[in-house]
Amino acid sequence: MDQESIVYGCIKDSIQGVGYRDRIRANREAMLTLPRADNWPFLCQEMFAIPALDVLTRNYQTEVMHFGASYKAVEYEWNQWIEQFEALLGKMYWVSATVHLETELCGTHTFTWESSRNYHTPGSGDMYVQCQWSHESSLGL
C-alpha cells in the first residue's frame, strides 16, 4: 500500500474593526490565485474553504479559512509544500495559521505561523513558524 499523508488546518483572521470586508476580499483573491486541482499542485483552490463576499460573516470574532487534502507521501516534498503555503500566507491578512501533517511513518507534525505584530498584512514578510512533533507507535516502544 502507498504511504498516505493527510494535511489539514486553518488560517485565522480577525473580523473586528474597520476594513474587515477588505481583508476578506484580499484573502479570497489570494486563494483564487492558486492553481486548480487538475494541475496537481501541492496547494490548489479546491482544498480551501474560500470566503464568500456576498454573505455577511456569520463568525463571531474570527474568520476561519479551513483547508485539507490527501497526498501520496508529501513529507518527502514537504519543503516545497511549506514554501507554497508561506507564499500564500504572504499575500493574506491573518492572525495565525496552523497546519497538521499526519504521516504513516513519521507521526504527526503541527506547524503554527504567527506574526510578531497583532496580525500579518500582505507583503510584510512578518511571520515566524513553530513546529511540534508527536508520534504514537503501535509497537509498544
Image: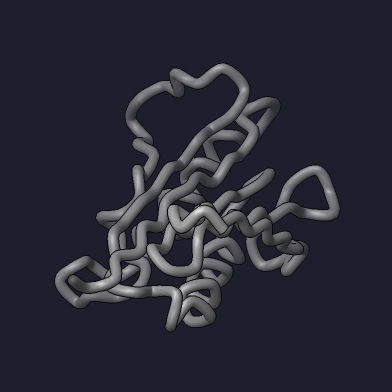
Q: From what the image shows, is residue 39 above or below residue 95? A: below
Location of the C terminus (image quadrant): bottom right
Percent position of residue 26, x then y: 51, 51
On the image, the x and y values in percent for residue 57 come to: 45, 23
Q: As drawn, which residue projects farthest toward the right?
A: 116
Q: Residue furthest front?
A: 140
Would residue 94 appear left or right of 59 to someone viewing this image? right
Residue 118's image quarter?
top right
Q: Is residue 50 left or right of residue 58?
A: left
Q: Number of labelled discs?
A: 0
Q: Where is residue 92? Give x, y as percent.
A: 57, 56
9 lies above or below 4: above
Q: Residue at x 61, y 29 (%)?
A: 15
In the image, farthest residue toward the left: 38
User: Residue 44, located in which quarter of the rendered image?
Assistant: bottom left
Query: What color scheme is it?
Result: one colour
Return the residue nearer the eye: 128 or 61.
128
Residue displayed at 57% across by 61% down: 89
Residue at 73% in and 69% down: 125
Q: Quadrant of the N terminus?
A: bottom left
For this view, does 2 lie left or right of residue 117? Answer: left
Picture coordinates of residue 21 (x, y %)?
A: 53, 35
Q: Residue at x 36, y 67 (%)?
A: 43
Q: Going by the image, does 82 lie left or right of 7? A: right
Q: Between residue 110 and residue 128, name the one nearer to us.
A: 110
Depth check, front residue: 31 or 113 = 113
